[in-house]
Image (cartoon, rainbow, N blue to C red):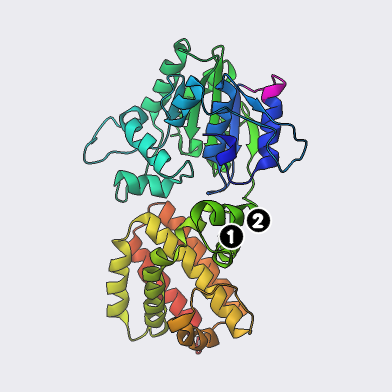
Amino acid sequence: MQFAEIVGQRRLINSLIECVKEGRVPHAQLFAGAEGCGTFPLALAYAQFINCTNKQFYDSSSENELHADSCGKCPSCLKYKNLAHPDLHFIFPNTTTKKIDKNNESALFMDLFREFVLEKQGYIDINSWLDFLKAENKQAEINVRDANSIIKDLTMTAYESPHKVMIIWCADRLRHDAAPKLLKILEEPYNGTLFLLISENTEAILPTIISRTQLVKVLSIEGEDLQTYLVENRGFETSEAEYLSASSEGNLIKALQLDEQNNKELIEMFIEWTRVAFMYKAKAIEIMALSERFSKMSRERQQSFLSMASDLFRESLLASMGVSFGVEMLGGENKEYKTKFSRFLNNENTERIFSLLKQAQYHIIRNANTKILFFDLTLKIGIQLSPNK
């Protein structure tokens, strides 16, 4: 992957380029940032640039323009493009599946992981990965076997490049018994070894791991950069891209999930869900049936629904104040519903609803029983919508 393929992040990329140019590449770096901001593709493009044999430097001093990039044509770059360079190693969360029912480790899923990364063009998240694996409701971790693989792979001499690169995706998912095994090799790595750790939740990483890395803080994608990408690379209309950019808060993954066809079903479910929630005292059977439907959705889609629900509650609240929400999701045939629904929203209960939705998203990540979760969530939101609560 080349830097030119990264959405935004030009200032950060240029600072990484300067480190390589001046020979100041740390042996271990931690790329930390929220989902969808580009931590994984940044680390991958950075590794490709380091090992490129024909780096391209540009005559530009602007912080918003690339100062250099990998050539994309040398043998090293071509192998990086296919994630098949012999000196590029990946470790990532994994779990048992129908095909691999024991002794799971990253190496057994490597072909699937390459396919997944290439399909997503580098912008990956853990829920999509678990859905891709068909892992159902299982939790994925980086286990002791993975830690042993890291040590084993890095003891070998580099095949083709000056640097062996170990990319550890979701380093916060290192098991408590796996993380300590990496402390020594992180502190005293073999010559030519580079560790690139990636995490959305650095608080879950052992402090002793963090202390052995240099932090690379990756911010959310700036709105203008995201909007431009959606128009030029994904074919969105300008007005639609503007809305997606604003509502996704710099998260490319979320923005791409908010396409019209994918969301039509979710919007219909939102309308059905809020109607049932509003009548929660008399709709216990309907709430139970709806919760059953939610529980059969993938965790990725459950997260998408709750994220969209937050946007739809916000749009309805603004409608109650007579404020335009740009490109409306509850427009057209659903506009009448929004007009009626918005009467039951105010700043106070909407804030509580946002909190409930955020808590639900957290519990989904933590592998909660989603049938019970959505049943409870529906009741609580129904109480907030009730005029007589």
Q: Quote the CA–CA distance across marks 1 and 2.
A: 8 Å
In the image shown, does 298 or 360 lie closer to the viewer?
A: 298
Q: Position of residue 151 (x, y in %)?
A: 44, 18
Q: Residue visible at 44% across and 11% down?
A: 156
Kindly identify which residue carries mark 1: 245
Q: Residue visible at 42% across and 30% down?
A: 82
Chief secondary structure of the magenta portion: loop
- Element on which disc 1 rests: helix
Q: Residue visible at 58% across and 60% down?
A: 245
Graded by Cα atoms within 10 Å as few (under 14), some (14 to 19) or many (20 or more), the crowding at tag 1 reads many
Amino acid type of the residue tagged 2 in the rendering: Glu
- Element on which disc 2 rests: helix
Q: Quadrant of residue 376?
A: bottom left
Q: Is residue 224 above or below residue 169?
A: below
Q: Is residue 62 in sight in this rendering?
A: yes
Q: Tags 1 and 2 in contact by the CB under 8 Å rule?
A: yes
Q: Position of residue 287 (x, y in %)?
A: 32, 76
Graded by Cα atoms within 10 Å as few (under 14), some (14 to 19) or many (20 or more), the crowding at tag 2 reads some
Kindly identify which residue carries mark 2: 224
Residue stretch in magenta: 20-26
